[in-house]
Amino acid sequence: MKVKTSHTSITDQDVYILLSKIPPGKVSTYGDVAKALGHPKAARAIGRIIANNPNPISIPCHRVVKSNGEIGGFAYGEQSKREILEKEGIKFQNKIVENFEEQRLSF
């Protein structure tokens, strides 16, 4: 699938390859992914691609959170996403990543 963003497009594969570069214990945002792919205004398009991730465990879309550090959605539910991230070393204060800027990977 390709998502149109202004003059070019972002493929699912482009997004999934980039997601695979987010190491355990780090998170990134939809906007960070969009910027890394050269489309800084395509955060929503990235979200749509991630929502269609055919394998949400091996392609670590659970490591993508909202720009304010909130946990955001996940195919297996928000609680499951939180549990996976906690197992990887991410801590939360309510629904927000603790020390968000320190845990954030900006490509």
Image (cartoon, rainbow, N blue to C red):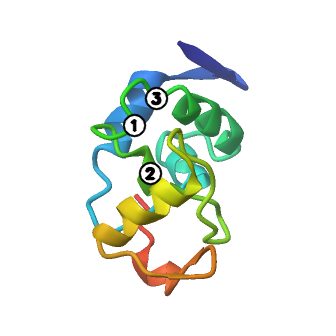
Rate crowding at label 3 as few (under 14), some (14 to 19) or many (20 or more) other CA atoms within 10 Å. many
Q: Disc 3 or 2, which lies upstream in sequence?
A: 3
In what element is the residue under mark 2? helix
Q: Residue at x 53, y 35 (%)?
A: 50
Which amino acid, mark 3? Asn
The reply to whether callout 1 and callout 2 are in contact (CB within 8 Å) is yes
Pointers 1 and 3 in contact (CB under 8 A)? yes
> Where residue 78 appears, x then y in whole percent?
57, 55
Q: Nearer the viewer, residue 52 or 76?
A: 76
Tell me: residue 74, above or below residue 51. Answer: below
| Total tally of numbered discs in the picture | 3
Q: CA distance from mark 1 to mark 2?
A: 7 Å
Disc 3 on helix, strand or loop?
Answer: loop
The correct choice, above or below, for 19 with respect to 29 in the image is above
x, y percent for residue 73: 61, 49
Q: Amino acid at mark 1?
A: Pro
Reading the image, the residue beneath label 3 is 53
How far apart are the alpha carbons under marks 3 and 2? Answer: 10 Å
Q: What residue do we see at 64% from left, 31% from top?
A: 48
Disc 1 to disc 3, how far (Cα)?
A: 6 Å
Residue bearing the label numbered 2:
62
Q: Which residue is mark 1?
A: 56
